[in-house]
Image (spheres, rainbow, N blue to C red):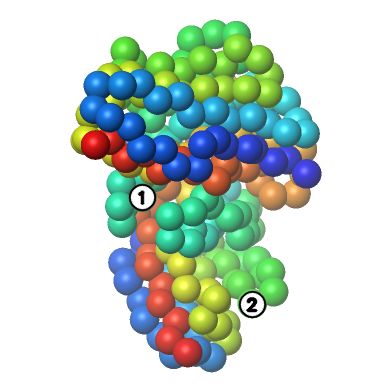
Amino acid sequence: SQQGEEDPQALSIQEGENATMNCSYKTSINNLQWYRQNSGRGLVHLILIRSNEREKHSGRLRVTLDTSKKSSSLLITASRAADTASYFCATDPYSGAGSYQLTFGKGTKLSVIP
Amino acid sequence: GAVVSQHPSWVICKSGTSVKIECRSLDFQATTMFWYRQFPKQSLMLMATSNEGSKATYEQGVEKDKFLINHASLTLSTLTVTSAHPEDSSFYICSARVFQGRRGGYTFGSGTRLTVV
């Protein structure tokens, strides 16, 4: 079942602006991951944030996690036209039984206008 | 490291025929692989979890007899869409959990776009 919910569903910004996408989830997690998908292509792993972390940076990416609100945000700073893609959050549930299963949100389609 | 190679990247088939999609882990052993389906402009929906040497676990609503999964070795999992129909047209993506490395343990294939005519 689908757990993550991203908003906005679509976002259009000018090159150089920052883009913020949010993700909410419902159950306990081990970690939360963000992926990018260019149209009709596979997924590219961007960043992972563990349940005991609150913020993480990777280049122009900044991810926050609020486990009390069961939400995460992905910030892309100084956006570029090449950042145009769909972005998905995925939750890796806590499981002591060794069962691993990512659950994806609906995604945010980001368009960066040159 | 940790690459999953998925083939074919696209396939067009006639209604009623079967199509096999392969996913290979190139430099690691994948005891578990995941198969997702993605309809246009939608998210990935987990179809089944494939376990090497045992039967796959299917998600609710996914027909086992239609989507046959075989995971006969630690490096190969296949998804066969049997008696395909136009409504099976979709983007299929496999994924494997990697127990080593820095990237959270999941790597994805590049996807297969299936069009049934």
Question: Considering depth in this image, is A70 or B21 the residue closer to the camera?
Answer: B21
Q: Chain of mark 1?
A: B
Q: CA distance from mark 2 to mark 1?
A: 24 Å
Q: Nearer the viewer, mark 2 or mark 1?
A: 1
With respect to residue B27, does B16 lie above or below?
above
Drawn side of residue B44 relative to residue B49, left or right: left
* Element class at badge 1: loop
The quarter holding residue A100 reads top right
| Quadrant occupied by the C terminus of chain B | top left
10 Å crowding of disc 2: few (<14), some (14-19), many (20+): few
Question: Considering depth in this image, is B6 or A107 the residue closer to the camera?
Answer: B6
Residue B58 shows up from this direction: no
Q: Which residue bears the numbered disc 1?
A: B43
With respect to residue A20, does B3 lie above or below?
above
With respect to residue B48, does B44 lie above or below?
below
- The residue at the point 45 percent across, 42 percent down is B10
The quarter holding residue B77 reads top right
Relative image position of residue B50 (x, y in whole percent): 52, 21
Relative image position of residue A4 (x, y in whole percent): 38, 51
Question: Considering depth in this image, is A113 or B113 the residue closer to the camera?
Answer: B113
- The residue at the point 78 percent across, 44 percent down is B1
Q: Which residue bears the numbered disc 2?
A: A60
Relative image position of residue A24 (x, y in whole percent): 38, 57
